[in-house]
Image (cartoon, helix red, strand yellow):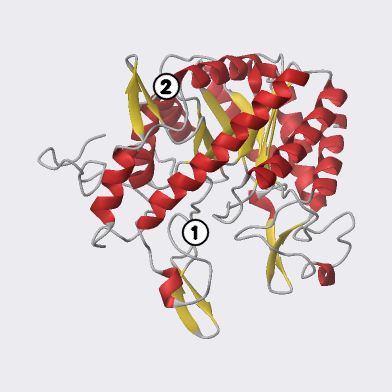
Amino acid sequence: MTGDGARSTPRQPWPTGVEAAQQPDWATHPAYEPSCTTLASAPALVTPEELARLRRALAVVAGGGAVMLQLGDCAESFEETDADQVRAKTAVLHALADEVADGTGLPVLRVGRIGGQFAKPRTLPHEEVGGVLLPAFRGHMVNGESPTPEARAHDPRRMVRAYEASADVLRALTRERDQRARRVQEFEDGPWASHDALVVDYEARLVRTEGGRRFVGSTHLPWLGDRTRAPGSAHVRLLASVVNPVALKLGPSVATDELREVCALLDPYRMPGRLTLIVRMGAERVTGLLPPLVAAVRDAGHRPVWLSDPMHGNTVREAGRKTRRLTDVVDEASRCKRVLERAGEHPGGLHLEVAASDVTECLGGKVDGVDRLAERYTTLCDPRLNPDQAAELMRAWVRS
């Protein structure tokens, strides 16, 4: 993607007239162009060889020979990037993946929401805190969570800090992967890193070309959210131009024609392993909305990995906090699986927001009442399952 060719660092990395939804407001900040220049010259955090291995593994999942588990924090923190914290997060991923492997008898591809999940889309650009209207918190790549005007200002220098934090996490992730590989024959050497490719300024400046292959150098598996999947958007144009495997969130508003169009852009050669579709409809809607989408994708010749994200369509407010009920999460995951099976498609796995610690952000299990939510509600954005709740969900999904 190119901008004004007269600039070594274009003021925006997408053509004029192309939509780029949910972007930070920082183009006039004095640090904008220096930050973009720093990113443009930084080493890629992933390699084409790693991407090829991941695509091979995803092709196995798409063909029904394995399942995939993609999980981690809703929004990563700049303060949680050291080796011990990465080890704790991957330990939860491995424990839950091992449980799914035991229950299904299939290998499990392990992917984390990790090493770059520092930006979040928001429904509203502002929120009121203590009677003061502030810009919404959009993740540490964009602004801070403290409810002050200074913290909430969009700061492009945070992109550089996000890159450095991602580099720390990915180095730790590689060490964990290498150590585990000495003990366990891992399915295509996971776990892999993934995040929402939301901030185009960041992702586009980290695109690299090596051996004739153009790739997003920020992560192994970038995904597009429900708010940034429009076929003509800068986000879709960017991911359509690279060899990374890519994923797409499907919310209740997606239409079959739109889905066919964006799938054709992202997966023009209909290659298994290229495209993952992540369903996030809500427990009450998935049974009615998903079947025509599955049929449209299949009839167009695509063979994606189908994942259920049973978290994002089931958010409610209780006692002033966002939460999710484990019963709703289980219901959507199970119903999505049944829809896919009835359509003759392989239920490829789950995409979840799960903490590495015993948080009390979702209702269910030991969090047996609304009054328990405040005990350990530490998420930066949306509520996460704790490991016990996630394990209960895994067992229910395997049985369903």
Residue 375 located left or right of residue 383: right
The residue shown at (61%, 47%) is 82
Q: Which residue is mark 1?
A: 122
Q: Nearer the viewer, residue 28 or 47?
A: 47
Q: Position of residue 97 (x, y in %)?
A: 77, 30
| Disc number placed over residue 243 in the picture, else none | 2
Question: What residue do we see at 61% from left, 34% from top?
Answer: 173
Identified at 41% across, 56% down, the residue is 158
- The circle on residue 254 is none
Q: Which amino acid type is marked by label 2?
A: Val
Residue 170 quadrant: top right
* Image quarter of the N terminus: top left
Residue 126 appears in the figure: yes
* Res. 115 visible in picture: no
Query: Label 1 amino acid?
Result: Arg
Picture mark count: 2
Of the numbered discs 2 and 1, the one sitting upstream in the chain is 1
Q: On the rendered structure, is 307 left or right of 238?
A: right
Residue 400 placed where, x, y %? 85, 32
User: Does residue 292 lie above or below 137 as drawn?
Assistant: above
Query: Contact (CB < 8 A) between labels 2 and 1?
Result: no
Q: Residues within 10 Å of mark 2 (few under 14, many from 20)?
A: some
Q: Secondary structure at mark 1?
A: loop
Task: Residue lying at the far left in this picture: please name it.
Answer: 6
Residue 285 falls left or right of residue 98: left
Q: Secondary structure at mark 2?
A: loop
| Quadrant position of residue 67 | top right
Instruction: Measure the alpha-carbon separation of dots 2 and 1.
Output: 28 Å
Q: Nearer the viewer, residue 86 or 120?
A: 86
